[in-house]
Image (cartoon, rainbow, N blue to C red):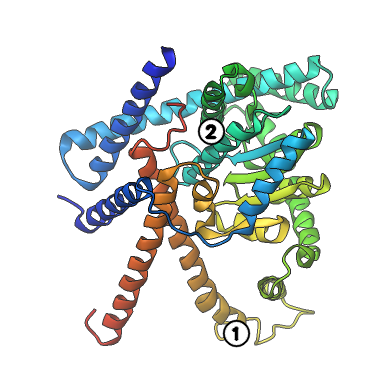
Amino acid sequence: MIQVFETIFLLFFIGLIIVFIVLEKRGQSTFFRDLPAFRRLKRALGLAVEEGKRIHIALGGGSLVSENFASGLIGLSVLERLARVAAVGDRPPVASSGEGGMMLLSQDTLKSASRRLGLGAEMLASQGRMTGTTPFSYAISVQPLMREESVSVDLLLGSMGSEAGLMCDASERQGNLRIGGSEDLSAQAVYYAATTDPLLGEELFAAGAYLECGTAHRASLRAQDVMRWVLIVVLLVGVLAKGIGLL
Amino acid sequence: MRMTLRAPVSTAIAVLSGVIVLVGYFVEIPILTSLRMVFLRWAFILSAVALVMGVLNMVFTHWRQMRQGQGNAFYHLAFFGGLVVTVVVAGWFGISHPFSRWIYDAVLLPVEASLMVVLAVTLTYALTRLFPIQRSGFGLVFLAVVLLALLSSAPILGKQFALLFGHDSLLNYLSRVAGVAGVRGILLGVALGSIATGLRILMGSDRPYGG
């Protein structure tokens, strides 16, 4: 038995991404609305390299086998992009995680970034660290890293809950730029109150496109926009059908 | 040479296993379903192995920092002491033994509970600083909803106001209509983003495994 609607939805999504990848490669790009978080991040990245400061990316504690792993994958894409830029400075970026699988992936990401730059693979890989195994132990034990490693930007891009508030507080005490995004609703509420630039809802998943992580990121963001309109139309048709008694 | 060989192999493994698991979810073919279960079992085992690697990483990081005189030595010693005691007790007696449970009940739980209290204070402090950070009408809405939710969490001086309590209250209406609608909208965006992220991995364009 085939799950028809889910299969059609997925195939349509894949088709859109492929179409937009082709269009992007042909140079037919699109304009994305301004998101201040990414504008400020780009500026802060340049300043960090100039001042010999470090960027910290908190990847959270999303497990490899859980459904909340996607935000951590976005964090890894951003880590790879920033490592390519910031590794030429005195202090390469550092990635913290609250789960073993995420730590291994962050080390692998940093290794591949350093290989591309022709640097020693182990030099950057040691900057991927696990700091705690439970949400609160992770949020607390990442704080010495924020204090003692000359961090100027904290990017909280991973699976976290309300415990992210503790990290935001530590970051604020250091006077760091704080950008936070998570798929968790309580974390989003905390980020709204405690970060300089919160990423709400799907804004987190736009990070790759805005930070120029590759054609596929731009294409998938355009596909997401189309799919959002498809869903809106389906919802409105459903409401109308229900209203006139067809459903 | 190592890099050029490794990249396509790891990408092929990731894409192939991902496609098999996904197709096994959508199409009920016995061999695909059993393959999917095998892969998921492997993923759970690898996840446990990754946890051990993570703990080893914490040991090496604390050891290196202690040798280089970085950070507070007390924290490093507390980490090593806690790790050794927990591993020895849980390893020797088993994780369900009263000694192991005592470590969990008398040390871990109280510490995490105290952090919950610290979090409550931290979030209250963050709320007082909301307006310097979020200078917009949405900041005001956020603050108003938080205050309404706090006021409705318990009777005020022993009295329950109709505006805040009960099925017909303003707060209940806000939660049921505006709140649920907003949450669904945000979750739809998150779901679309998560699917797109997964599809990029399946298409091999995102390779967080260093391929």
Residue A49 placement (x, y as % from top left): 72, 35
Question: Hey, what amino acid is under mark 1?
Answer: Ser
Q: Looking at the rendering, which quadrant does residue B45 occupy?
A: top left
The quarter of the rendered structure image containing the C terminus of chain B is top left
Answer yes or no: are tags 1 and 2 on the same subunit: no
Percent x, y for residue A222?
A: 40, 56
Q: Residue at x 31, y 47 (%)?
A: A22
Label 2, secondary structure: give it.
Answer: helix
Residue that mark 2 sits on: A102
The answer to which image quadrant residue B7 occupies is: top left
Q: What is the secondary structure assignment of the residue under circle 1? A: loop
Chain to which mark 2 belongs: A
Q: Is residue A8 left or right of residue B133?
A: left
Q: Is residue B109 visible?
A: no
**Depth check: A206 or A58 in front?**
A206
Q: Nearer the viewer, residue B68 or B2?
A: B2
Q: Is residue B178 left or right of residue B118?
A: left
| Picture quadrant of residue B165 | bottom right
Q: Nearer the viewer, residue A162 or A177?
A: A177
Q: Quadrant of the N terminus of chain B?
A: top left
Q: Which residue is at 70% across, 70% downward?
A: B139
Front of the two marks 1 and 2? 2
Does residue B134 appear to the left or right of A1 in the view shown? right
**In the rendered structure, which amino acid carries the disc numbered 2?**
Met
- Give the alpha-carbon distance from disc 1 to disc 2, as whole Å: 44 Å
| Residue, far front | A27
Task: Identify the residue under disc 1.
Answer: B169
Question: Which percent across, then down, holds residue A111?
Answer: 54, 23
Asked whether residue B147 appears in the rendered view, the answer is yes
Q: Which chain does the numbered disc 1 sit on?
A: B
